[in-house]
Structure formats: C-alpha cells, structure tokens
Image (cartoon, grey):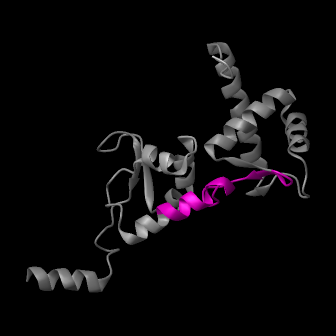
C-alpha cells in the first residue's frame, strides 16, 4: 500500500473537523476570489489560515487539499488560494464544465437523466471527483441538480424543464403536430 495513508476513525474525525474549521473561516470572512490580495505562494496562504484558525500548518494543508478536491477552493500556482463560490468553476475543470454545457445545449443529455460521472472522468483521464466538481457552476445556474435520492439513485441529474420555460415556438410546433 505504497502512497496510501489510511486514517484511523479518530484521525478522520480530526481531519473533517479541521476541514470544517478552514471552510467556515473562508465562508464567513472572504468573498470569492484569492485569499490574500497579492499573488503569494500557497505556503503563505497556509500560514495565514493556520494563524487565523489556530490549527497546525500541516492540518491546514490537509484541509486545503480536501477543499481543493471538493471544489471549495483552488490551489493556483504562483497566485495562491482561490476561494470558489458556486458559480466560479475550478480552474482545472473549466474545459470539462464547458464540454458538459455544450452537451446540454446540444441536447445530448435528456432532462431528468443522471450524468454518467464515471464515464466523463474516464474521458478526461482525471480523478473521479473532477466531474462532480466541474458540475458545481452548472448546478448553481440551474442546468443540473444534485439529488441525494434521485430516481436512479444519488447523483447529478439534468434538471427537468417546465412548460413555462419551453419557448413558445416549441410549444406551438408540438400543438400543430398533435392537433
């Protein structure tokens, strides 16, 4: 098991608590954008967060990695930590989010259908967490929805379109076809 570190339940709880503390600090005190105003090294941002949260730098570093994987912030080389809000895509995922959006625009995904996140991850060759992270801005825009109890299980689904959102020309064409 080279390279894999298994946390004890106590260690996992401590990491979760540290992640929550860093996330709470960022959410309460910082808008979206970079943590420190000038371009800084990521380690300077870690030190800043450690001093503000009272946590050891190694613990903050671990929490920051977790938040990066989730898409709550991005580690940007030469710029520092970028705090992401729902509408801001992770810089590593902009291309993936654009391709998913194009697929939605083309009608490749049917409303109510779950996205095949594992297939999307294979297409990009990245970790399986990236497609979910790439979908966050699309969820924020209302194009997708995250359903913990979806019709086919938990996942990210294409949001169904209500009849009020369908353009009049489409409604008229359907009336002509059926009438």
99 within the magenta span? yes
Location of the C terminus by quadrant is: bottom left
For image coordinates 50% across by 46% down, the residue present is: 121
Instruction: Tally the marks.
Output: 0
Write down the quadrant of residue 23 in the picture. top right
154 part of magenta stretch: no
Q: Is residue 174 above or below residue 19?
A: below
Residue 33, placed above or below residue 72: below
User: Residue 48: image x %, image y %?
Assistant: 90, 41
Start and end of the magenta stretch? 77-100
Residue furthest out toward the left: 179
Q: Quadrant of residue 174?
A: bottom left
Q: Nearer the viewer, residue 101 or 152?
A: 101
Please indicate whether residue 97 sits to the left or right of residue 59 in the image.
left
Q: Which corner quadrant of the image does residue 16 belong to?
A: top right
Whether residue 55 appears in this view of the structure is: no
């Amino acid at each position: 098991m080279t390279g894999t570190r298994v946390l004890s339940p106590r260690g996992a709880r401590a990491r979760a608590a540290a992640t929550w503390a860093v996330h709470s600090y960022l959410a309460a005190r910082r808008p979206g954008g970079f943590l420190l105003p000038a371009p800084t090294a990521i380690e300077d941002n870690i030190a800043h967060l450690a001093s503000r949260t009272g946590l050891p730098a190694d613990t903050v570093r671990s929490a920051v990695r977790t938040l990066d994987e989730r898409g709550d912030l991005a580690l940007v080389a030469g710029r520092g930590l970028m705090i992401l809000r729902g509408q801001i895509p992770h810089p590593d995922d902009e291309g993936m989010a654009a391709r998913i959006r194009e697929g939605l625009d083309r009608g490749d995904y049917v409303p109510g259908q779950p996205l095949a996140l594992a297939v999307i991850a294979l297409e990009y060759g990245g970790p399986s967490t990236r497609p979910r992270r790439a979908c966050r801005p699309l969820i924020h825009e209302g194009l997708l929805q995250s359903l913990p109890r979806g019709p086919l299980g938990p996942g990210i689904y294409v949001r169904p379109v209500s009849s009020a959102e369908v353009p009049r020309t489409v409604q008229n064409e359907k009336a002509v076809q059926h009438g």
